[in-house]
Amino acid sequence: MNNRILSNHAGKIAISSALIGASNYLLMINVTLAHIETVSGRVPFDMRPLGYGPTEATTILEALGADGRAYYLSHQIALDTLYPAMLGLTLIGTISWFGKRMPNRKLVRFGIALSIGSALFDYAENLGIAVMIWSWPQVPDPLVYATGTATILKSALTSAAALLTLLVGFSWARLSKTVARP
């Protein structure tokens, strides 16, 4: 039943969540993350796809100051609680929509798994950033390493899920041309 509902509404889910997610992303990039970078003079945690260690984390948190850390929690983390779900739904909806015609659904299932993993690691990153801010100035190194690793995994899984979505889309287009030929 749930697969049929998703299958019948995958396009609507993909488009709706893409519009919400893109709006949210633009707001984060142009407002909250830009403000954090201006206040700290550093690239925010969220925008460091290769992660960070304790020295970088301490430098960012110190440069933010009390007001910047409070802003990170109240504005950036608040907005970033919506984004991973919207990106995940966009990718899952798109993969499901294009994947309906594919005879072998393994690629579709793999793409859905990557999309879910991407969202989960984004939430882990957000939680880690929040805990680092709450822990300031006594931020444990293992917390920084775990959060930096979540950032790396989020970035890698998001890239892989987006590439797989494109691959499924290209496969769908090829199948559509093959089916349309007399």
Image (spheres, helix red, strand yellow):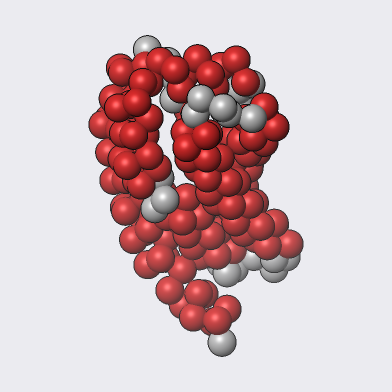
Q: Residue at x 55, y 81 (%)?
A: 2
Residue 7, position as x, y percentages in the image: 52, 75
Q: Quadrant of the C terminus?
A: bottom right
Front residue of 78/119: it is 78
Residue 165 seen in this snapshot:
no
Front residue of 82/92: it is 82
Q: Quadrant of the N terminus?
A: bottom right
Residue 11 seen in this snapshot:
yes
Is residue 53 toward the left or the right of residue 87 in the image? right
Front residue of 36/19: it is 36
Front residue of 83/180: it is 83
Q: Residue at x 58, y 46 (%)?
A: 124
Q: Residue at x 38, y 58 (%)?
A: 17
Q: Is residue 161 above or below residue 140?
A: below
Tell me which corner region of the image, top left, top right, bottom left or bottom right, holds residue 109: bottom right
Tell me which corner region of the image, top left, top right, bottom left or bottom right, holds residue 125: top right
Q: Is residue 179 above or below residue 159?
A: below
Residue 170, position as x, y percentages in the image: 57, 49
Residue 79, position as x, y percentages in the image: 34, 46
